[in-house]
């Protein structure tokens, strides 16, 4: 991920601010607990004194005293644990309430960037904050089947619009639940306003919340990065290009809306094929039909999608129009 010094400093300041806030929270919890349970303060003070005494005995090589001090510290720790439990405090009450428990809000694990840092870099560099805001509303908690009809039938599958939507949601759930154990990809197609982008966002929200890195591009913006990499040859272009193949989940929205030519066709195949080889999942949404997809992007690209993606066709009345008629706000569907 290409970060300038300024961008890196911005991210690190955010982590430092989290750590300071965590410290304030812990200190306030300790103050309140000491006030309610004076014995707790006595235990902590005695433990501190024992630590100093233990260090002295260690220097002196006094093994007998060391053994007694360790036993005393263990007894105090057990007493503290029981005291907290008896008064309804959880075991981790004095632990910092970290946003990321893996790196403890430092951004690094054993000298390597944490997954949360990688996603923060994605959000900053690719300006994904607008996507984050959309995900606050476009998620499974707000997903509704009310916009799908039980009377509209797909003659190919025999399923109604509603049954198809229910099956699509089930496929998305399976994709999320097996994300770390099974390599899968999703391909949504169908008419405008049938929920393709919404479902992509639902999946993205779940995976982001579980600590995975996800990056969203419209097809046009994705191909702009490919073009920049091919013709600029800068370090930033190289790293941006590299990240497309390394993120846990790549979302390509509105495939087919870009200006298509031999360059975009070849780059799409390279992108999809490379991510398949690396076992990195991809979600594609498009208004194109399968025959159009093969005609525009070649049979070999269509072959990769048909063999390695779960293909989901959504159909029904335009949800945007339905919401507009009801006076409801709507995002991309």
Image (cartoon, rainbow, N blue to C red):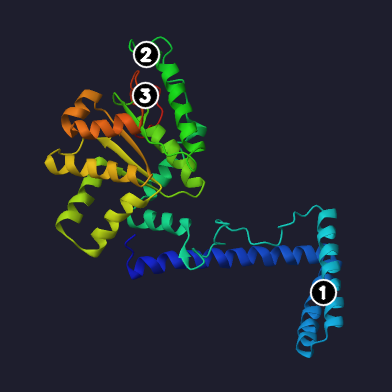
Quadrant of image for the N terminus: bottom left
Residue 305 visible, this orientation: yes
Q: Quadrant of residue 77?
A: bottom right
Q: CA distance from mark 3 to mark 1?
A: 67 Å
Residue at image position (80%, 52%) is 88
Packing grade of label 1 (10 A; few <14, some 14-19, many >=20) is some
- Do tag 2 and tag 3 residues touch (Cβ < 8 Å)? no
Q: Residue under label 2, please give it.
A: 157
Q: Position of residue 66 (x, y in %)?
A: 82, 80
Element carrying mark 2: loop
Is residue 256 left or right of 113 when viewed as pictured?
Answer: left
The mark that comes first in sequence, 2 or 3, is 2
The location of residue 134, given as percent across then percent down, is 41, 41
Q: Is residue 165 above or below residue 2?
A: above
Toward the left, the furthest residue is 262
- The structure residue drawn at horizontal position 47% and vertical position 25%, both measured from the top left corner, is 144
Instruction: Describe the element under mark 3 as helix, strand or loop.
Output: helix
Q: Along the polypeptide, which appears first: circle 3 or circle 1?
A: 1
Residue at the image point whose x is 41% and y is 19% from the top: 164
* SS type, badge 1: helix
| First in sequence: mark 2 vs mark 1 | 1
Judging by the rendered image, the residue that carries numbered circle 3 is 319
**CA separation in Å, label 2 and label 3:** 22 Å
Labels 2 & 1 near each other (Cβ < 8 A): no
300 vs 45, left or right, is: left
Badge 3, how many Cα within 10 Å: few under 14, some, many 20+? some
* Residue 211 sits above or below residue 176 on the image: below
Q: Which residue is mark 1?
A: 70
Residue at the image point whose x is 43% and y is 17% from the top: 162
């Amino acid at each position: 991920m290409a970060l300038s010094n300024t961008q890196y400093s911005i991210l690190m300041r955010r982590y430092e601010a989290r750590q300071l806030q965590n410290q304030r929270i812990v200190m306030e919890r300790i103050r309140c607990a000491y006030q309610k349970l004076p014995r707790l303060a006595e235990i902590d003070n005695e433990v501190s004194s024992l630590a100093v005494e233990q260090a002295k005995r260690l220097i002196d090589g006094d093994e007998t005293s060391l053994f007694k001090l360790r036993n005393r510290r263990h007894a105090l720790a057990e007493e503290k644990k029981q005291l907290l439990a008896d008064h309804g405090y959880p075991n981790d009450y004095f632990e910092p309430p970290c946003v990321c428990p893996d790196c403890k809000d430092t951004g690094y694990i054993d000298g390597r960037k944490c997954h949360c840092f990688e996603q923060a870099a994605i959000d900053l560099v690719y300006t994904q904050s607008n996507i984050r805001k959309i995900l606050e509303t476009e998620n499974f908690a707000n997903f509704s089947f009310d916009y799908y009809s039980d009377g509209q039938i797909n003659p190919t599958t025999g399923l109604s619009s509603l049954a198809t939507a229910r099956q699509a949601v089930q496929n998305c759930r399976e994709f999320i639940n097996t994300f770390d154990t099974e390599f899968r990809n999703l391909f949504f197609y169908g008419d405008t306003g049938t929920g393709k982008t919404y479902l992509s966002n639902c999946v993205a929200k779940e995976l982001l919340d579980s600590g995975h890195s996800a990056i969203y591009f419209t097809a046009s913006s994705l191909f702009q990065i490919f073009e920049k990499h091919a013709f600029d040859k800068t370090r930033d272009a190289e790293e941006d290009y590299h990240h497309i193949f390394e993120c846990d989940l790549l979302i390509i929205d509105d495939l087919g809306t870009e200006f298509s030519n031999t360059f975009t066709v070849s780059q799409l195949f390279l992108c999809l094929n490379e991510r398949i080889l690396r076992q990195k999942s991809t979600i594609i949404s498009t208004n194109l039909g399968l025959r159009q997809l093969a005609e525009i992007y070649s049979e070999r690209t269509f072959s990769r999608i048909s063999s390695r993606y779960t293909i989901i066709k959504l159909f029904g009345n335009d949800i945007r129009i339905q919401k507009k008629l009801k006076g409801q706000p709507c995002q991309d569907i």
